[in-house]
Image (cartoon, grey):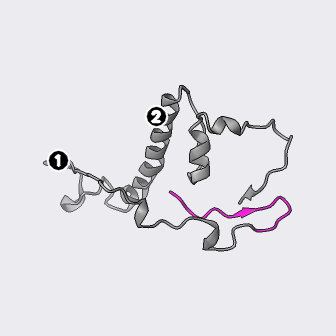
């Protein structure tokens, strides 16, 4: 669910002015081994004309299916946090940018960046 994230300074200067400011996915981002299997022999009695779509037969399932990526990322973060000894709920805003994913992992590296008290600092950038 990575989309371009427009960032501006608190004074309004735009930091993200082009593709040089964010990482465009490349061939190296694809896993070497990526095994996927589909459920064989399943029957959907409510499908429209034997389609794989759910009840209404419109684009809702494909549209909402993209949310599974966000929740898969959230589950991966939860597993990383448990490996590091952190348990419980955490907040992950969408879009799940690399920065948000990294800071949500809560491990020995993110502890070097403590969360300041509300109103005690001026941010480097502001999300739009």
Residue at image mark 2 = 79
**Lateral position of residue 6 relative to residue 24, left or right:** right
Q: Residue at x 48, y 65 (%)?
A: 25
Q: Is residue 102 above or below residue 2?
A: above
Q: Residue at x 26, y 52 (%)?
A: 36
Query: Which percent across, then down, holds residue 24?
Result: 52, 67
- Are there few (<14), some (14-19), or many (20+) residues within 10 Å of tag 1? few
As helix, strand or loop, the secondary structure at mark 1 comes to loop
Residue at image mark 1 = 42
Does the magenta portion include 112?
A: no
Of residues 45 and 116, the one nearer the viewer is 116
Q: How many marks?
A: 2
As helix, strand or loop, the secondary structure at mark 2 comes to helix
Which badge, 2 or 1, comes first in the chain's sequence?
Answer: 1
Query: Which percent across, then down, holds residue 29?
Result: 43, 60
Query: Which percent across, then down, holds residue 112?
Result: 69, 37
Q: Residue at x 76, y 68 (%)?
A: 14
Instruction: Classify the position of the C terminus by image quarter.
Output: bottom right
* Quadrant of the image occupied by residue 118: top right
**Lateral position of residue 29 relative to residue 38, left or right:** right
Does the magenta portion include 12?
A: yes
Of residues 52 and 71, the one nearer the viewer is 71
Q: Which secondary structure type mostly characterizes the magenta part of the structure?
A: loop
**Lateral position of residue 38 relative to residue 61, left or right:** left
Q: Residue at x 44, y 51 (%)?
A: 69
Q: Is residue 108 above or below residue 47?
A: above
Residue 8: give its label: none
- Are there few (<14), some (14-19), or many (20+) residues within 10 Å of tag 2? some
- Give the magenta-colored segment's residue range: 1-14
């Amino acid at each position: 669910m990575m989309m371009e994230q427009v960032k501006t300074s608190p004074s309004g200067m735009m930091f993200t002015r082009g593709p040089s400011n964010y990482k465009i996915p490349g061939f190296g981002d694809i896993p070497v081994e990526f095994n996927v299997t589909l459920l064989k022999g399943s029957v959907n009695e409510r499908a429209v004309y034997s389609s794989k779509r759910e009840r209404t037969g419109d684009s809702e399932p494909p549209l909402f299916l993209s949310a599974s990526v966000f929740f898969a990322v959230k589950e991966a973060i939860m597993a990383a946090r448990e490996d590091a000894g952190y348990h419980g709920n955490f907040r992950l805003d969408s879009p799940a940018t690399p920065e948000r994913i990294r800071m949500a992992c809560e491990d020995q590296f993110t502890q070097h960046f403590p969360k300041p008290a509300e109103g005690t600092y001026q941010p480097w950038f502001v999300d739009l």
